Structure formats: structure tokens, C-alpha cells
Image (cartoon, rainbow, N blue to C red):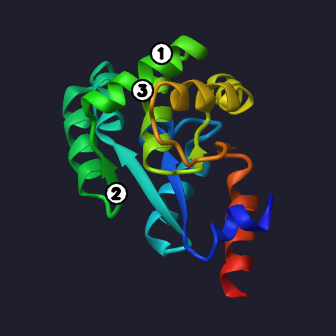
Amino acid sequence: MQSNLLKNRGRMIKAYIDTNIFIYAIIHHPSYGALCSRILRDLGKGLYKPYGSLLVAIELLGALSKINPSIARKAVELYLALDMAILPLSEEIIDLSSIVNEVINVRYDAIHVALMMLHNVPVIITNDTDDWLKIAQNYDNIRKKAIEEGYKVNLPRVHVVTPEYYPKWYKNLKINHSK
């Protein structure tokens, strides 16, 4: 991973935490539960600036309500209380996500991409590798189309950090943070 991504030009790196990280931690997923719980424990340690959105809260409510509506409610309350920037949804975000979806049909993930683009969040921590690797590979086309449509997009690329890669990514942050 490049040093400038880790340092983000002297500022703390911004990372968007995808819904599946929370869900896998909450349900104690047999393969990803422990890794995702670690990611959530690290949120407040100050090595990166975590971001989420109201869409993550909506997705948590929907997914966890299938299991238990009371757990879903508590999860949303705890999510919204985290020391994390919660990005709002707006007409601008929805419009940009429709442009993203036109370039590469990734449904709701297009909203997450639009949020990241307009708030300059270069990293997504997710276990949804199918859609997010497709997004990362096609990001130049997405960005070009957004700029053609009049959006000011300064984010040059999107980096995908999976739960399996997260410990190495986090270790690199610690090393670069101590320099």
C-alpha cells in the first residue's frame, strides 16, 4: 500500500465502514465475526477517521430486522451513537449515485460510492469484494462521467480493505503514524 494513502498528505486517512462489517460482528459470523469485531474495536483508536452514513443505518435496520427487530433497533441506536462521522443522504448524493449506477450497476453500493466521492473518503472497509473490486477497477470511468455531469470530484481512486487484509492495513497505519 502506498505511503501517501496511509498518510493522506499528513492528515489522518478517511475510511468508510460498510454495512456488512457491522452485521458480521453483530451476528458473530463464523468466518468474519472476529475480524469485523476487531475493526469495530479499532474505530476510536485514532489511526484513521471512520465514516458511515444514514444508508448504513437503514441497511442495518433492514438486514437485522429479518433476524430480530429488537436487535435491529439496538444496533441502529448503537451505530448512530458511535464516534464516527455519519454522512447524510441528499438529492445530490442520490443523483450522483444514479450516474454511478449508469456506469456500473452496483445498486445500493452506488450510494456509498457517491458519498465517498463527494466527501473525499478514499478507503472502504468491506467484505463485499465482488461489487467493490468492480467499483475500484471502473472508478476512472465513474469519476470521468461524474465530472462530465458537473460534479467536482477530487477523489482519485477508491481502495478496498477487506476484513482479511485489515490487520496488515492497520499495522501499516500504526507504523506510518509513529514516524
**Quick check: marks 1 and 3 in contact, CB under 8 Å?**
no
In the figure, is residue 66 to the left or right of 103? left
The residue that label 2 is drawn on is 85
Measured in 3D between alpha carbons, the distance from the residue under mark 3 to the one under mark 2, in whole angstroms, is 20 Å
**Mark linked to residue 27:** none
Instruction: Indicate which label's residue lies in the foreground, 1 or 3.
Output: 3
Sequence order check: which comes first, mark 3 or mark 2? Answer: 2
Residue name at image x 64 percent, y 42 percent: 158
Quick check: 43 above or below 155? below
**Quick check: marks 3 and 2 in contact, CB under 8 Å?**
no
Say what secondary structure mark 3 lies in.
Answer: helix
Sequence order check: which comes first, mark 1 or mark 3? Answer: 3
- Is any part of residue 161 visible from this angle? no
Instruction: Indicate which label's residue lies in the foreground, 3 or 2.
Output: 3
Query: Where on the picture, by quarter, is residue 57?
Result: top left
Say what secondary structure mark 1 lies in.
Answer: loop
The residue that label 3 is drawn on is 96
Say what amino acid the circle numbered 2 marks: Ala
The residue that label 1 is drawn on is 107
